[in-house]
Each structure stands twice: as structure tokens, then as C-alpha cells.
Amino acid sequence: MPAGEVAVSEGVDALARVPRLLVALDFDGTVAPLVDDPSMSRVAPGAQAAIDRLRGIAGTWVAFVSGRPLASLARLTESGTDALLVGSHGVEVSIRGEIAELALSAEENDRMTRLEAALTGLVASVPLAHLEHKPVGYGVHTRRVVDQSLVPPLQAAARHAADGVGGFTTRVGKDIVEFSVRDVNKGDGVRMLRALLAGEEGGPVAVLYAGDDVTDEDAFAVLEPGDLGVKVGEGATQARARVADIPAFTQLLADLAARREASVQLH
């Protein structure tokens, strides 16, 4: 086990006993399988069952923290009015149905328009590449591109276009490069959720954060002693624990729910 990592069972056992726990989850590749058509993605049934159990335990909250736009995230997670959702890498926030206003400035909107014009032609030149319009930027998707040799030049050209316009934060994920006019990330979203719950509950809140992509490293980086970051899948990470895939993470969530239910009953 690499230095700094902990056994999954050890980390889960510790979180099962904390008074207040926030379970913050990336969506795609963490609890929902990656699919060619993002609109068809759904939480895996076993993961959904574990999430429902966790939500029913006193002192336990489940949030989704994703790069997806907030509207898409809310629809795909089938979240109710009590949901905690962070979309667009921390830019969009919905707290129990209350949505924070984005209020883009005229200058930000102008930059968005200029970048869209540049990216539209670039993406159209690569068969099956797709340009996603996000509330504060754009995503260049390449998952369905058959000739993968076309992907690096497309991504390089897209980054050059964003640099030419100026003022965009660039993030590279699995089969996507994203550009945002707001410089916030998933770590900001996790910090905000922790502070909100701690303020409401009058005491510290431990965090389990799980994700599979490069953009989840921002969230792992803000975790504190007593928290647990779980990397789902391969790749370098700051997370202290790792599981192989979505089924393995689903089992982790189920184990956490069972142990936390038992801990609450004891107290």
C-alpha cells in the first residue's frame, strides 16, 4: 500500500462512527457507468440503494458534486427537494431546492460567445466530436470519436482558441476538455457543503469524497484529517483509499450504510 493510503475497510469503519458525515459523490464513473450518450446515464441500482440507506441515517447527508450542469445532474440523480447538488465543477449550487444565481457579467458572456464561435468549427471538423454548452463554459467531448488520432490535435486547437480569447480555466478529464469563465472547482464545492452543514448542526462534519477523474483531485486536496478520499479506478491520486470500479465502490457504500446504521443504534 503506497505511503499515506489507508485500507478501505479501516477508513469506512472510522467514518461509520463519526457523529456527522457528508458523503459527497462524483457522478459519472463513480456511481454511474460511463456511456456514449451522457443523457442516458443513471446511478447504478446497487449504488442507489446504498445512497437511499445512507440518507435515512441520522447525522448523514449525501451530495453529488459533478462537472455536469446542475439541471442535468438533478434530472439524472432523480434528486428530491432536499438534495445537495454541486454542478459545473463547483460553479452551480442547489441546496434543498434553493439555487444560487450565476449572474454572468456582460464581459463573461462576450468571452463565452467568442469561444463558442471558435470551438464550433473545430469540433465540426472531427467526426463524432461534440460541443457541450455549459452554464459558464464549454466542453469538447471526444468519447465517440472513432479515429482517436484526431483527438490530441482537436484538444490542442481548442485550448489554443481558449487562450486566444483569454480568461478561461481549462480542465482535462476523461474524453473531454472543458473551459470555464469561473475559476472554481469541486474542492470549493466540498468546502462550501461542509461549512453549510457544520453551521446548521453546530459541530464538525467529516467527509467521504469519491471520484474517478482528474477533476476530482481538487476535492481530494481539500479533505482534512478524519476525512476519507476514495479514488474509483486507476490513475495517480491524492485520495487515501482506492477501489477498482463502480461495483467495488457500491459495496463500499453498502458497507458504510450497514456499519453506520449499527453505530447509530448503539448510541
Image: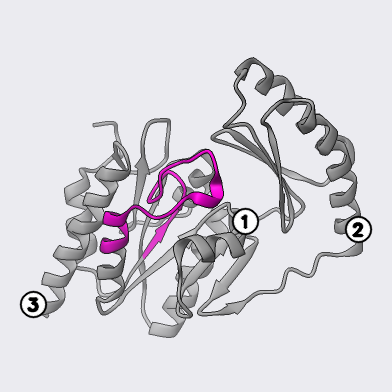
Q: Residues within 10 Å of mark 3 (few under 14, many from 20)?
A: few
Q: For the residue marked with disc 2, what is the amino acid?
A: Glu
Could you tell me how many numbered marks the image carries?
3
Secondary structure beneath label 1: helix
Question: Percent x, y for residue 5?
Answer: 28, 40
Residue 207: image location, x then y, percent: 36, 62
Q: CA distance from mark 3 to mark 2?
A: 56 Å
Numbered mark located on residue 59 in the image? none
**Mark 1 crowd level (few <14, some 14–19, many ≥20, 10 Å Cα):** many
In this picture the colour scheme is: one colour
190 sits to left or right of 210: right
Q: Secondary structure at mark 3?
A: helix
Q: Which image quarter: residue 70?
A: bottom right
Residue identified by numbered label 1 = 88
Horizontal arrangement in the rendering, residue 22 relative to residue 164 (left or right): left
Q: Amino acid at mark 3?
A: Leu
Residue under label 2, please give it. Answer: 107
> Which residue carries the number 3 mark?
266
Q: Few, some or many C-alpha atoms within 10 Å of disc 2 (few <14, some 14-19, many ≥20)?
A: few
The answer to whether marks 3 and 2 mark residues whose Cβ atoms lie closer than 8 Å is no
Mark 1 → mark 3, Cα distance in angstroms: 39 Å
**Location of residue 126 in the rendering, given as x and y in whole percent from the top left corner:** 73, 25
User: For the residues carrying marks 1 and 2, which lies nearer the camera in this image?
Assistant: 1
| Apparent side of residue 137 relative to residue 84 in the rendered image (left or right) | right
The C terminus sits in image quarter: bottom left
User: Quick one: label 3 or label 2, which is nearer the N terminus?
Assistant: 2
The first of marks 1 and 3 along the sequence is: 1
Calculate the distance from the C-alpha at mark 1 to the C-alpha at mark 2.
20 Å
